[in-house]
Amino acid sequence: MDVLLSIKPRFAERIFNGTKKYEYRKTIFSRADVQKVVVYASSPVKKIVGEFRIAEIIWDKPESIWLRTCISAGVKRDFFLQYFTGKDKGYAINIKHTKRYEVPVNPWDVLPGFTPPQSFMYIDSTNTFSP
């Protein structure tokens, strides 16, 4: 099983240029068999732009996550803390083996009834989005 994550375009760019090694989330998928993340760059891009493998998922108090991941966060501390305001726990998806698609994919063409997820959606591992 794979997941499709909605990620703001500026953060998707940082993932694929290697400056962001962690994707932070307030909630995480419940399935333990997720190994690959397909990246949907949200508005204004609105395309599937690439994918990455999950090295590990860290869950802890936000401040502890920051201390463990800040060197490769791809975001500033203030932004990180604002994102987790009021949360006792957070998640950091450790990114490995990124693959940027040469041609971004229109999700409405390949995922019947597609609606951009607020956070993530499960997708079948047999879906392939790049040529």
Image (cartoon, helix red, strand yellow):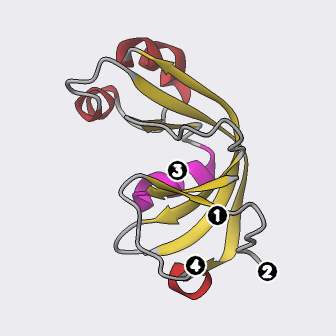
Which SS class for mark 3?
Answer: helix
Within-10-Å neighbours for mark 4: few <14, some 14–19, many 20+: few
Tell me which numbered mark, 3 or 2, is placed earlier along the sequence. 3
Specify the quadrant that holds the C terminus: bottom right
Tell me which numbered mark, 4 or 1, is placed earlier along the sequence. 1
Tell me which numbered mark, 2 or 1, is placed earlier along the sequence. 1
Which SS class for mark 4?
Answer: loop
* Tag 4: amino acid: Leu
Inter-mark Cα distance, 4 to 3 = 25 Å
* Tag 3: amino acid: Arg
* Tag 2: amino acid: Pro
Q: Do the residues labelled 2 and 1 touch (CB within 8 Å)?
A: no
Which SS class for mark 1?
Answer: strand
Q: Residue 111 carries which label?
A: 4
User: Which of pointers 4 and 3 indicates the residue nearer the eye?
Assistant: 4
In the image, residue 90 lies at what x, y percent? 40, 25
Q: In which quarter of the image is residue 30?
A: top right
In the image, residue 94 lies at what x, y percent? 62, 33
Magenta-tinted stretch? 7-18
Q: Residue 14 carries which label?
A: 3
Within-10-Å neighbours for mark 1: few <14, some 14–19, many 20+: many
